[in-house]
Image (spheres, coloured by chain):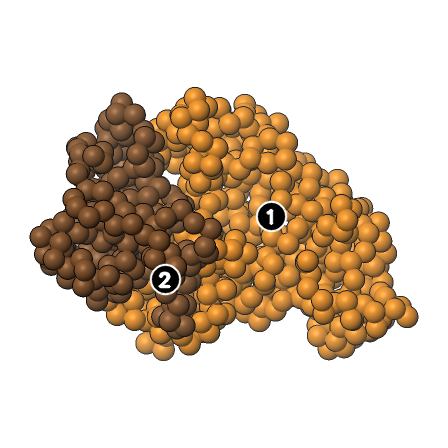
Amino acid sequence: MLEVIRVEGRIGEEDWTIVPYPASNAPRPRAAGKAGLARNTGEAAAPPELLAGLAVPAAGKIIVPLALWQARRDGLQQRFDAGEIAVWLDACEEVEVLAAAVDLAAAPLLALDFPKATDGRAYSSAALLRERLHYRGPLWAIGDVQRDYFAFMFRCGFDTLVPRAGRYTRAQLEEAAANLGLFAHPYQGAVDDPLPLWRRVRRPQQEVRT
Amino acid sequence: MYRYDAYDQALVDARVAQFRDQTRRYLAGELTEEEFRPLRLQNGLYVQRHAPMLRIAIPYGLLSSPQLRVLARIARRYDKSYGHFSTRQNLQLNWPRIADVPDILAELAKAGMHAIQTSGSCIRSITADHLAGIAADEEVDPRPFAEILRQWSSLHPEFSQLPRKFKFAVSGARQDRAALRVHDVGLAFYKDGDGEVKVRVLAGGGLGRTPALAVTLHDALPWRQLLNYCEAILRVYNRYGRRDNLYKARIKILAQSLGAQKLREQVDAEWAHLRDGPSTLTEAELARIGAFFAPPPYEAAGDESAALDRLRALQAEDAEFAAWMARCVHPHKQPGYRAATLSLKRTGRAPGDVTSNEMDAIADLAERYSFGLIRSTHTQNLILGDVRLDALPDLWRDARASGLATPNTGLLTDLICCPGGDFCGLANARSLPLAQAMQERFADRGRLFDLGEIELNISGCINSCSHHHLGHIGILGVDKDGAEWYQVSLGGAQGVDAKLGEIIGRAVPAEEIPAIVDKILAVYLDARQLGERFIDTLRRIGIEPFRGRVYGIKEKDGKKESREPQHA
């Protein structure tokens, strides 16, 4: 079971299993800029050797890497149709590629990976999925999901946050959830509320000097 | 200037509470060093050579007398009673304790200040022309736009973890005093033929290891689209900027690898979606923010020529006053007023350093002479922006009594210098002792004035905090087998015609630098024509005569070496 935080700080559980890439020393095009490069050079987000070593559980609800879905789609389609397969997107992969490969309207959920908390690409991916591709289903943040970034993730359109297993105690998660409303009136628009503060509320005028 | 409403106040208060909690969890071992690092950096807190360093935001270089007194008090209570103005118009404290930082931030918040995004891989505190709103050559006051950008960029969720730092600078004048072309984004506001405010958007500039001048992304952006367009730039950068190599992560590298045209196309494609969206600015919002920057209640000028005559008479009597008038007083758009620099570059003092007592004195001067407002400059000085012409002699006497009237603005001893190896954990070399040696060497007023306007920039390492690439004379500290060496470049310039300096030859040990500068200046003095500034002579005769004099018969070796990479 995955312990997750949902919008408004509700803590819950999910019976999905995230299928990661096998731990390997093989270089992965994690580098930013690679998404752009991939478009120009055709370089794959995940090399075939990496996919070859990937064990896919034969049953249960699983979230697989997009590259695996692309490579073994025929074998997985039936389970996808049954709502047992979901796809996660690497930070270096583009949502446009995801949208072309997965039927967003039929997907049970989408997950975006934060390889580390300081890699902010998934924020833009989430915003684009919501605003540009009009994805309305569950959107998960997975990977290095740290409590100090929960609020930013929700603002960008994630609705389910999955911290690394064992990273936080239940009490710590509750404390983090209780702090979600700390910034009640952010300045700028985002996915959760596209209006900037000055369109959301009436801000005071400066008194005119006499 | 801008004043916080309840929303601004609630946000900075919440930020203090958040950081207090984060610091508590860090000190309790709940947050690892690695987890805490980006959190503290985005609150301006570095861990440095001797102690933490806290960088306090002075948004676009504007602060009030009460705020400066708060900074003085904080420096007294939590530091060693002084602070350091940086080339990004911010104030750095070099000796706070980590455990005290939440309290410092709380005191700042009470005075409408913060340290949000003064460091870290995010949109940094925004800088501006230090004469914004008062410059005689200004078309559009950029301060309301700077404040709009400050709010938009503060805690922007999507752009909270960029590949690297991202610096904005703004200007609305014909002269560029904000070094727009060496920023990640430089915004030049102007009025088009129909009187409409437009923005020239420059992007991809930066210094550091790979210095680059920005390219033009948009020549005439309608001001209402400002945030939409910036959002498009940041989104392209956030998605495609490199994250595999710290030194290749700035937008300048993306601009170089894509090429200006392709970057422009990608930004335009993104902007096409965002255009006219909810962040589109309105007349009403610009007017609301603009009202905070309305001109102060100037008094009617009277006859400026009579006041000028009186000043000229005083200048004839007192050479010190004449020197100050010549160097530290600047034109103003309001008749009867001038802007005046309070120099933080007196000999024997680290450039940009200011004591708590001086901060209090400056706050008083600002209230007495300039509507209680102070401006910080990217050349590490302070400016009183709105001084009555006939009050200049009194201001000069008072400033002089506080040691703030060194008449060297724009001259060699107004040099720009980072804290260097004495404080900074990144530095290769101790730039401050070198700066002091230069100031002492050129302390002679007659010689200094005779040399005229020369920009000297000394950086302690390739991160280029002192913008040495833009110095007419740039000096860069490099590490050579554990020893401090320096590399000299010539011909850099800021402004509309910004140019990066050219390295003249191999690096030399610190003690040789003063003699090299002497040789460079000797070439200038020999070659200059009447009224020609150093940079004019350099542009006319080229770099070779300087190279030849400095490196003598080894000129060829020098040239050869200069083509090699600066760093292994």
Asked which quadrant contains residue B25, the reply is top left
Instruction: Give the quadrant of residue A127.
Output: bottom left
Is A193 left, or right, of B247 in this rendering?
Answer: left
> Which of the pair A69/A137 is nearer the observer?
A69
Residue hosting label 1: B380
Q: Nearer the viewer, residue A88 or B528?
A: A88
What is the drawing colour of chain B?
Answer: orange
Is residue A30 something one can see in this rendering?
yes
Q: Is residue A76 above or below residue B99?
A: below
Answer whether labels 2 and 1 touch (C-beta < 8 Å). Answer: no
Q: Closest to the observer: B20 or A49?
A: A49
The chain displayed brown equals: A
Q: Position of residue B145 (x, y in %)?
A: 36, 56
Within 10 Å of disc 1 (Cα), the crowding (few <14, some 14-19, many 20+) is: many
Distance CA(mark 2)–CA(mark 1) = 55 Å
Please give the chain letter of the residue carrying mark 1.
B
Task: Kindly identify which chain the residue marked by label 2 belongs to.
Answer: A
Up the image or down, B388 lies above or below A174; here it is below
Determine whether, in the image, residue B450 is placed left or right of residue A156: right
The reply to whether residue B1 is in sight is: no
Q: Amino acid at mark 2?
A: Pro
Picture disc at residue B473: none
Q: Residues within 10 Å of mark 2 (few under 14, many from 20)?
A: few
Which element carries disc 1, helix, strand or loop?
Answer: loop
Mark 2: which secondary structure? helix
Circle 2 residue: A48
Which image quadrant: the C terminus of chain B? bottom right
x then y, percent, for residue B547: 81, 69
